[in-house]
Amino acid sequence: MIKLSICGISDLVYPYCKYGYTGRVHSIFHHSFNIIVGQHLIHVSGEREFLSSFGIQLESQDFQKLQGLQIDDLVTLKKDKIIIYSQTDTYILSGPENVVQNMMVFRVEFSQDEIEEVLGLVETQLSFNKIGIEASSDFHQIQEMMRSGHLSLTAIETIIQFLIGRGLGLTPSGDDLLLGYFWGMRVLSDYLIQKEVEIYLSQNLTKTTIISREYLDAFLKGFVSSPIYRLNKSLERRDSYSANKAIQRIATIGHTSGYDFLFGLFLSLKCIQKMKMRGTLYETEKS
């Protein structure tokens, strides 16, 4: 029996048994793995600077002790601990309640000049050739729609239906782009479209992977992963240095996930700029 120390917990998954008392190891990666409990995942990270919106974080030296882990290993969940039964050993994951973190998205009121500054920081880190969606006339039209400053309900629905599940990998690029776009809208605009985004995203979640679905579902509940939350806090403090560091960290997520998120954020900033110049935020009629 090996005891492992949890050093970070997303408020979204605590207590651990909120989705059920038994689960399985779902997927395993170099620095993380996922546990499936009912229809939901709990992400377990061994990275010092990454806590998933739907996960927990282990000390890196403890994570290295999980070498015998295999897909489908049995997991039991209690309020404050997770027990994994592998073929080689039993692992008990636990940590103090004071490491539970509330990583909820919150609004930051920015002027036009401040939006321009954030846009500059994003553009500095963004590599357009690293976006995970191939260029096409259809994708170009979607981009124009997203940056237009005229978001009708029909446009929102079209954007979501085009992007969700689009691209390769465990978190398709289209989903990461949507997350960056609507996160930007939620943080830096009045986000009058929140209800519509929730409806259209919820209706289309089955079109993507289970891992990506968890990230989008967490966002709909108001939660994001730690690098994105740190950017939110940096923007609140008007701390350009910290914001730039947070953007740099986001860019390193996954193969293209970070760049896809930043491209979505870039498009939302362009849209917000035009909205502010027009003095109106959203079209509320179908068009």
Image (cartoon, grey):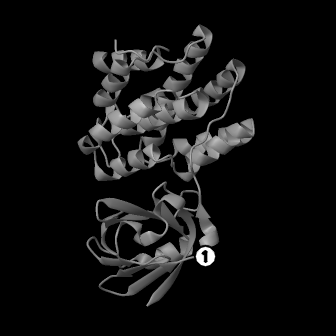
Q: Position of residue 134 (x, y in %)?
A: 32, 27
Task: Name the outermost residue toward the bottom.
Answer: 1
The quadrant of the rendering that contains the N terminus is bottom left
The quadrant of the rendering that contains the C terminus is top left
Q: Residue at x 60, y 60 (%)?
A: 101
Quick check: can you spot residue 29? Answer: no
**Residue 58 in the figure: left or right of residue 203:** right
Q: Is residue 71 above or below residue 190?
A: below
Q: Position of residue 137 (x, y in %)?
A: 30, 15
Q: Is residue 88 above or below residue 175?
A: below
Dot 1: few (<14), some (14–19), or many (≥20) neighbours within 10 Å?
few
| Residue denoted by label 1 | 96
Q: Position of residue 135 (x, y in %)?
A: 33, 22
Q: Is residue 191 above or below residue 254?
A: above
**Residue 80 in the figure: left or right of residue 132:** right
Q: Is residue 263 above or below residue 257?
A: above
80 or 259: nearer the eye? 80
Circle 1 — which element? loop
**Residue 7 in the figure: left or right of residue 39:** right
Quick check: can you spot residue 82? Answer: yes
Q: Amino acid at mark 1?
A: Pro
Task: Residue 164: name its quadrant.
Answer: top left
Task: Name the outermost residue toward the top.
Answer: 278
Q: Residue at x 56, y 13 (%)?
A: 280
**Residue 213 in the figure: left or right of residue 266:** left
Task: Residue 76: name its quadrant.
Answer: bottom left
Number of callouts in the render?
Answer: 1
